[in-house]
Image (cartoon, rainbow, N blue to C red):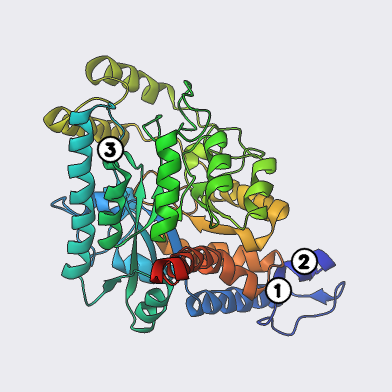
Amino acid sequence: MIRLGQAGLVALFVAGCAPQLPEAGSIVSEQQAADAAAHIHDDADAFHESIAVFDSHLDTPALFHTDDYLFTERGSWEEDGTHVDLPRMNEGGLDGGFWVIFTRQGPLDEASYAAARTHGLMRQTAIREFAAKYHEEVALAFSADDAERIIGEGKKVVFQSMENSYPLGLDVSLLEHFYIGGLRMIAPVHFANNQFADSATDINQIYDGLSPLGEDLVREANRLGLVLDGSHASDATVRDMIALSTTPIILSHTGATAIYDHPRNIDDALLRELAEAGGVIQMNIFGGYLEQLIPSPERQAALNVFNAEYGASPAGLEDEALATWFAARQELDRDFPRPRSTYEKFMEHTFHVLDVIGPDHVGISGDWDGGGGVDGMSDVSMLQKITRDLLAAGYTQEEVEKIWGGNMMRLVRAADEARTSRLMSPDILN
């Protein structure tokens, strides 16, 4: 027999879906306790299935032109290193989200801008082709209303975002072309400083935030109705974006400095500034940003050999050399796996941020197919665990629904409404 204390009852109780439980301090059998826990587990999973579940940063488009990736066939992180496909989305209750147009940062010169522009346009084309190929399973979304309709049709939602505005070169007017193609979220910068802004992970800060061209980018994104994404940006850049943007910004995949002091994470002061401006942080399930991960001696030795032969970074590599670098790195990672963080550490970040700014400003993103995944949550098939833990911690169903997409969709609506309001203003109509 075991005794259920008040803490045990609180852990089992889920608002709106709890079974009849014994009073605190009463004696129950282990089987009764297990049955009660199983009931709550099942009810939490049913609730998870009943709500719209979105991820704000899916890097899966990088796989769309590979020969061995099929969206409708179930893959396995353990076997092929992938995180997202239709069967696993169904298993995890994931309704879709923002599928990423990612371009690796390169030199800041005219030829490189042209190559980046071509790459960005091709990646957007790949997303649109994906939506056409699997039109019975997914659909492109251009607005929050579209997303609701698509879910109602039983399909997965395909919004588009751009991670790194490098493909725009020096011409922010090109953003309108991407917008017409479906782009609805834009991040100025990635791992290194570029023409628009300082990066969180570049030690040589150039602009102390946004560049003048970056300020033009923010204004153009506001004009068109895109959500601005501050992930990967330096703290100064994020503050500039908050100050300049006429609509709230998002951090599409970021963690908490208070739990792990990594340049990609943000501290409590900036969290509060983000929330005060109506913004949202999407908690990142990427192990390297959750805690310090030390490679095994065998992996470190293999990395030393790799770096000597191929270089520590693919920056500056193109075409065949770039493909060779990634193929060799994937082989190394298979033979000597990266150290991994844990689901518990991810939830530690999440609960901390929820404590600091509350559930109206928090969401979830796995950085799936872009390096995400931890022990205990290796792909999108396991997302119900987060819902169970949020409910068990005392967050209401309404709050959990906001965390799983309501907050993000609020920003999508705000950006679109600002565009519509501008287009309907007397100055424009006249």
Q: Position of residue 349 (x, y in %)?
A: 62, 47
Q: Amino acid at mark 3?
A: Gly
Q: Earlier in the sequence, mark 1 or mark 3?
A: 1
Residue located beneath label 3 in the image: 169
Residue located beneath label 1 in the image: 33
Residue at the (56%, 33%) spot, across then down = 262
Disc 3 packing (10 Å; few <14; some 14–19; many ≥20): many
Instruction: Give the SS element for disc 2.
Output: helix
Total numbered labels placed on residues in the image? 3
Residue located beneath label 2 in the image: 8
Q: Amino acid at mark 2?
A: Gly
Q: Position of residue 370 (x, y in %)?
A: 36, 46
**What is the residue that sits farthest to the top in this orientation?**
308
Q: Earlier in the sequence, mark 1 or mark 2?
A: 2
Image height check: is 206 above or below 137?
above
Real-space CA distance between mark 1 and mark 3, rounded to the nearest whole angstrom: 61 Å
Q: Position of residue 186 (x, y in %)?
A: 39, 50
Q: Earlier in the sequence, mark 2 or mark 3?
A: 2
Residue 1 seen anywhere in this rendered image of the structure: no
Toward the viewer: 189 or 421? 421
The answer to whether mark 1 and mark 2 are in CB contact below 8 A is yes
Disc 2 packing (10 Å; few <14; some 14–19; many ≥20): few
Q: Position of residue 172 (x, y in %)?
A: 32, 45
Is label 2 or label 3 in front? 3
Q: Amino acid at mark 1?
A: Ala
